[in-house]
Structure formats: structure tokens, C-alpha cells
Amino acid sequence: MLTLGFGPKHEERNFYGVPRQVSAWALHIQCAWTLSKAGKSIPTEKSLVGFDEEVNAFVISLREALARLAPVIVEGISANSECGLVISLSQSFRLIVAMNGAGDDEDWRFFEKKRDARHLVIEGGRIVPQSFD
């Protein structure tokens, strides 16, 4: 799963009481995605598949590369009727989220990082009705 943070950061303690910086909003992606810079694909969801050591090394290198470019700002978001997303970012980055069409599997969710906050959840290319309860 790809997890991304958006918005201002604040300190939060994890389950063990260890402080960490978290963003105000989160996007969790469990379907097909591609991150590109100036039209050139960087990673995709396949980059997070493999041996733990390889995946962890990839994630660390990507995180460090993006941190050097910070801040990366959301410039635009568009969605299609199948709940796919295109997120245009500063510095010529673009994140494309495409549905796998896998029935009841969760594709992605977007939520505010607050206790009891509502989550917009997409499963099987459709909005989960409980997202609006």
C-alpha cells in the first residue's frame, strides 16, 4: 500500500508513545498507481512488491529524493467516473491512480488524520456508501 500525506504536519504519538510528524490528510492507495516526473514514470505499485529488504531500500530512497525536493505542492486533482485519480503536483510530478476492477477490494481512501474522522473509501471502482455516514 502506498501512503501519502498532505497538508501541514503536526506531532502525534504512535501506539508506543513515540512522537512522529504526520500530515493533516492521508491518501492510502491499494490499487494500480504511477508516479511520474515530467512525463517519465518513476515508481509504480510494482515497486512495492518483492523482498522486504529491496522494497524498504526503494521506499527509503524515494522518500529521501522527495524530501530533497520539498515542498511538493498539489496543484490540481481530477477524478473519472470509475473513481480513478490524477493528482498534478508541483515540480512536474503527477500521480495517476487507476482502478484494478477487483470487486470488493479497497482501491483507495482519503481521510483527515483525526480520531473519528470520516474516510472517503473507494472499493471496486465505486464509492462506499458508508463514506458519507
Image (cartoon, grey):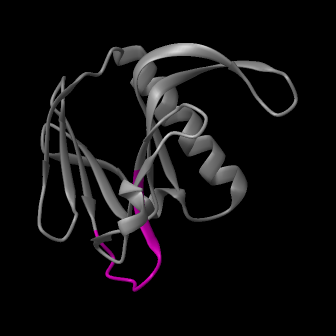
Image coords of residue 82 (percent x, y)? 18, 71
Q: Dividing the image into 4 quarters, which one contains the C terminus?
A: bottom left
* Displayed quadrant of residue 34: bottom left
Magenta stretch encompasses residue 61:
no
In magenta, the rendered stretch is 99-109
At 43% from the left and 26% from the top, the residue drawn is 65
User: Which residue sits furthest front?
Assistant: 133
Nearer-the-camera pick, 84 or 57: 84
Residue 128: in sight, yes or no?
no
Main secondary structure type of the part rendered in magenta: loop
Tally of numbered tags: 0
In the drawing, does residue 7 fall left or right of residue 38? right
Which residue is farthest bottom?
103
Give how far across and how far down residue 91 sits, in percent: 18, 23
Whole-percent x, y for residue 72 in the image: 29, 21
**Residue 103, above or below 69:** below
At x 22%, y 64%, the residue is 83
- Is residue 126 at all visible to an observer of this figure? yes
Instruction: Identify which residue is drawn at 12% across, 68% down.
Output: 81
Residue 77, percent from left and from top: 15, 41
Front one among 57 and 126: 126
Left/right of residue 120 with respect to residue 34 in the rendered view: right
Left or right, residue 66 beside residue 90: right
